[in-house]
Amino acid sequence: MRTRTAKGGQSVLDATAGLAHQFDDVEQQHDAATLGMWIFLVTEVMFFGGLLAGYAVYRAIYPLAFANGSRLCEVTLGATNTAVLIGSSLTMALAVSAAERGRRRLVLALLVCTMALGAVFLGIKFLEYSHKFAEHFVPGYDFVYAGADGREVQLFLCFYFGLTALHALHMMIGIVVLGVLATLVWRRRSAPHSNRIEVAGLYWHFVDIVWIFLFPLLYLVDLHR
Amino acid sequence: MSARWYYVVFGALLALTIVTTEVARVDLGYFNVVAAIGIAVLKALLVALFFMHLVRTPHRTMIVAGAGVFWLAILIVLTLGDVLTRGWLAVPGGW
């Protein structure tokens, strides 16, 4: 039976890649990693929060124009994307659960599913953007709008493109991170990196939460009119 | 948490998405904004508590997560407090 080396690594008794020397036990290491990711997510909350605060201010000042601008966004595509992201969060949570139970091939399948759903989301987003460009709804770029509040509608569209592009960038980073993790799991014969997958899962769920807020704020403003 | 609960939360999230879309089609005046944000907060809580395992995370980590939301609330509430109350006081030449 192998015992822990002085560097604290590669013991068969450890479920993860090894216990770093500054931690008392594996559970404390897991908690520290989780706390670290949550602190990063708090900075991400403030990152998106700045844009959302700007949105709140200008929606309060130009409520009608924001409603008109929201009509230019396609609710069906947005709602579909919401469902796709929620599904990807489900597969991500299932992947974390499978990793904790040491189910290597299930983890691989679920990680790939999560990445695929993320790619579907980005594909639909690309479709939406291409529609906007085709219909001349891009602020400051050949913008054509049949209405008096063109300036304010362009302001709304600035927030639309800014928020969704920033979100899409986070999605792409998330897909790359999951790809790296999937490769690690694929090459490793022992228990999958359950803590790393859980931490990556926190990031993925956060990106989902951001979209959960973006969908009603961008697509459903005064939908009843 | 068994895998079955994840599917329950997933179903709830999909249902709430449909609810928020349909409620938006009905004219409820100012309550539309309240409902939209409220349902979004509820969905975010479901994801945070169950998918992100906040229910089984040590409390010190939950406090950190709550702090982020708290700071965002300060940003939005105080900024809107400024913007929405402009012109309330009869100050000559300005706000």
Image (cartoon, coloured by chain):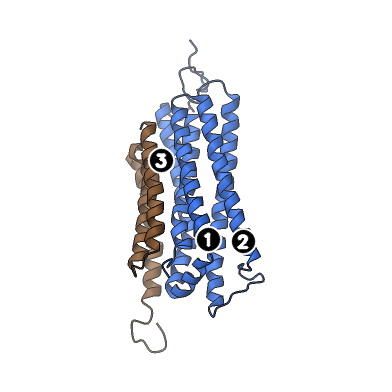
Residue drawn at the location 39% of the way across and 82% of the way down: B95
Disc 3 to disc 1, C-alpha distance? 28 Å
According to the picture, the residue beneath numbered tag 1 turns out to be A74
Same chain? Circles 3 and 2: no
Residue drawn at the location 42% of the way across and 88% of the way down: B93
Disc 2 to disc 1, C-alpha distance? 9 Å
SS at badge 1: loop
Q: Chain of mark 1?
A: A
SS at badge 3: helix
Q: Amino acid at mark 3?
A: Phe
Q: Amino acid at mark 1?
A: Glu
Q: Are marks 2 and 1 in contact (CB under 8 Å)?
A: yes
| Screen quadrant of the C terminus of chain A | bottom left
Residue B35 image-quadrant placement: bottom left
- Residue A3 in the image: state x and y as whole percent: 48, 14
Colour of chain B as rendered: brown
- Residue B94 in the image: state x and y as whole percent: 41, 85
In this rendering, would A181 be left or right of A62? right
Disc 3 to disc 2, C-alpha distance? 33 Å
According to the picture, the residue beneath numbered tag 2 turns out to be A131
According to the picture, the residue beneath numbered tag 3 turns out to be B51
Q: Chain of mark 3?
A: B
State the residue lying farthest toward the bottom: B92
SS at badge 2: helix
Colour of chain A as rendered: blue
Q: Nearer the viewer, residue B93 or A174?
A: A174
Q: Nearer the viewer, residue A196 or A63?
A: A63
Mark 3 or 2: in front is 2
